[in-house]
Image (cartoon, rainbow, N blue to C red):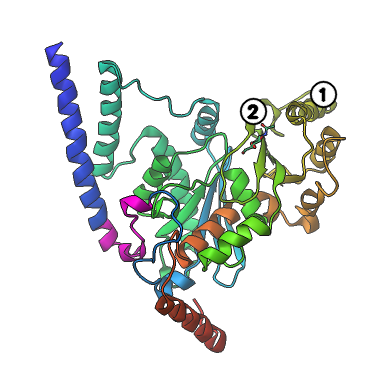
Amino acid sequence: MLSRLALLLWHLLLVIALENSLSEASSAHDRLDAGPPESWIHEPRPEDTVRVCPLPFCKSCRTAEQIQAPGIGFALEMGYGTASIRHHDGTYQDLAYIAGDNTYVSLLQRLASESPRFPAHDLSTYRGKLLWATERTQRLLSKNLGRPATPTIVVLADMLSRLKIQVESVLKDGRKVTAAVLSSPDLVSLSGEEITDALDYLSITNLMAKPDTLEDLYASSAAYAGLGMGLCDHYTDPYVCEQEDNEIYPSTRLLHLDFSPESLCVTIRWIKSAKESKVNKSIVDHDLGLGRSYVLKDVYWDAVRSRIRRLVQSFGVRITRVILTGSSASDQRFKAVVREALRDWTTVGAFDMMEQQGLDGEPSMLLYATARGAAEFAKRRLEGPVRCKETERCKEFRQGIEQAKSTNKLEL
Ligand SMILES: *[C@@H]1O[C@H](CO)[C@@H](O)[C@H](O)[C@H]1NC(C)=O
């Protein structure tokens, strides 16, 4: 009993010591690397951690580099990863599609089937405390030694490092990726800590974690944003943006289908802004990926049709918008099956976006929608103020940069 208690105490002390040394180490690290300096980040004071109105002033102005820097977005999907860039001129560049190896695919499948993803340790028992402390200790020890924090992070970081190489091959002047946003499937919902750990290992700042982790980005929101919906136009002015978020896009009952050789993911949610992440229902079926070998194709498509239909029916309301993502979503039979599955369960115009996607042999809108959305979030979080408002001086500086750009065609 006593020795157990001593062990627990030792663990806790170690965790506290490591948390401290880690935060010192990581801030030293931030100062050294070429990433965005810490100074531009509005550090929330305790009273700011919940949404306050009016917004506080930002601690500093964005630098010219931050304003013009491209946004880098990574998307981890069930069977592969993608990366896109959102340039300062508003265009997207789709860069990398990397197929996951067996380790990657089985990890994602395992994470998607874990429910709940983060079983809370029962901290009222010694055993729970000990487990918790051991986990924290291992994670922090690994991070301090410059290793990936957990076995899960090893696999994710491996995929990310391959995507990173491809992105860096097109960045000008041999620039490195120093900040990015990462999207993961709704059902996997990587935690802020997992995403930060994976990106940290590659010396990339997780832009969704600054200044706080109040917002998450998962596939259906990322795809919604990547397809040009659910985000305000004027994102450098938080008040205007807030108003636009409320007014431009109507509340949508969204059906997001992600279809690849590995799986069929179906997500239903009530969405207005792409900044929301709450999902009503999300399922993944690994037996219904396009790569599954069915002897009779008709049997397979019947199964796909009824899986989708049953889920939508169980909600008992009509879908107002359907969006597709995934490497198999351009399959014509699939689109036809989706239409049949939703017969009588959609409103007028629900298929408009779906029909546009993948036309003209343009796979980008299907394959890269999530990475584009992540890149859009990255761009906005680098360029615009996050949960703070800018002083007049900052705004003037920003306008000056934009004017110089339009007159000199400043290339970045
Ligand atoms: C879906 O979730 C929204 C909130 O995000 C809620 O208002 C709505 O009632 C839910 N719908 C169903 C059918 O559960």
Residue of label 1: 299
Dot 1 falls on a residue whose secondary structure is helix
The outermost residue toward the bottom is: 407
**Could you say whether the residue bearing mark 2 is in a helix, strand or loop?**
helix
In the depicted view, which residue is nearer to us: 90 or 59?
A: 59
In this picture, residue 8 sits left or right of residue 113: left
The quarter of the displayed image where residue 80 is located: top right
Query: Residue 218: x and y, percent?
Result: 55, 44
Residue 30 part of the magenta segment? yes
Between the residue at mark 2 and the residue at mark 1, the CA separation in whole angstroms equals: 16 Å
Residue type, numbered disc 1: Val
| 211 inside magenta stretch | no
The N terminus lies in quadrant = top left
Q: Which residues are magenta?
A: 29-48
Residue at the (39%, 25%) spot, across then down: 120
Q: Residues within 10 Å of mark 2 (few under 14, many from 20)?
A: some
Disc number placed over residue 286 in the picture, else none: 2
